Image: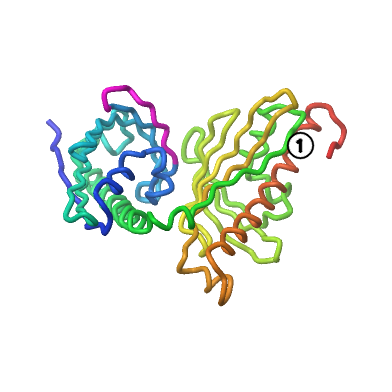
Amino acid sequence: MATVHRMQHTVTVGAPADTVYGLVADAANWPRVFPPSVHVEQTPLGGGEETLRIWATANDEVKTWTSRRRLDPAARTVDFRQEVSQPPVASMGGRWTVRPLTGTSCEVVLDHDFTAVGDTAQNVAWIEQAVDRNSGAELERMRATAELAARLPELALTFDDEVTIQGSAADVHDFIWQAREWEARLPHVKRVVLTEPGEGVQTLEMDTLAKDGSQHTTKSVRVSFRPGRIVYKQLLVPALLTVHTGEWILRDTPRGLSATSRHSIVVNPDAVTRVLGEGATVADARDFVRNALGANSLATLGHAKRYAEERAGLSKVG
């Protein structure tokens, strides 16, 4: 019988317990709260239960698994158990507990229990390190997010850029997914390092140029839901941001294929004046980021449009 190992992590948060419990319950929003989380597909089952398909980093590797959760808002607990784990994890589960301390503070307790493939010391150590790193990062970012909750409407921004393409979703998806070709295909991309750690999963590191000539290095994990959607999260973000997630969304419409680039960002308020200069505001930072990301996204979509329309037999069209 495999040994069951147990770990516990706690943090004190200067925010109401219900605010913090809401962050735990809203799993679809985890990529914008928890550093290791890349993407979550949330499926309600009824009776306070749901399944989650999670893509996340663990010890700098990209892993995916399926978990089942039971939420108890009255007790402010969430129990979870992995239904499909990835080696070296054989099984894993646990509980989130949010305990009020005062009206404006609480304690969060994150418990894990797990077994390791083969019950080997090496696999146990790998899991312990991953749980320790991820739990510490998650709880610290949860604390920071909850304590900044009143400012999130000011700091957070989601926006779309869209083009209409007379071509197929499969061709547009391929252009966006084949990022190895971006150095040759996209003028604003100067360097690409791409790996594919699993089916439909990529890590993408690249250097891009902004309109002002500045160069930025980013590193992202991307997940493909071919042919209509690619989601991603930046693991290495510019100094002006604390979070950047995004999607490429492809939908057929009566006008043609709608290709949308969606960005969700959170501004780092402590970096605004350092990056943009004295007197700059969070509103200035939002505008700067929106313009910079939008320009690059529209450039990418423009090239994807030409690629797909040429493959559809249209001569070089806008």
Q: What's the magenta bit mostly, secondary-structure-wise?
A: strand
Residue 78 shows in the view: yes
Q: Does residue 115 appear anywhere in the picture?
A: no
Read off the residue under disc 1: 307
Would residue 62 appear left or right of 68 to someone viewing this image? right
Q: Which residues are magenta?
A: 39-48
Q: Position of residue 293 (x, y in %)?
A: 63, 53
Residue for point 73% across, 47% down: 185
For mark 1, does the 10 Å Cα neighbourhood hold few (<14), some (14 to 19), or many (20 or more) residues?
A: many
| Residue 208 location (% of width, % of height) | 64, 57
Seen at 29% across and 48% down, the residue is 20
Give residue 95's position: percent from left, percent from top. Answer: 20, 39
Q: Total of numbered circles in the picture? A: 1
Q: Is residue 16 magenta?
A: no
Q: Position of residue 42 (x, y in %)?
A: 39, 31
- Foreground residue, 134 or 18? 18
> Residue sitting at 60 percent across and 62 percent down?
216
Residue type, numbered disc 1: Tyr
Looking at the image, residue 137 sits to the left or right of residue 297; the answer is: left
Which element is circle 1 on?
helix
Tell me the quarter of the image containing the C terminus.
Answer: top right
Q: Which residue is nearer to you in this view: 235 or 31?
A: 31
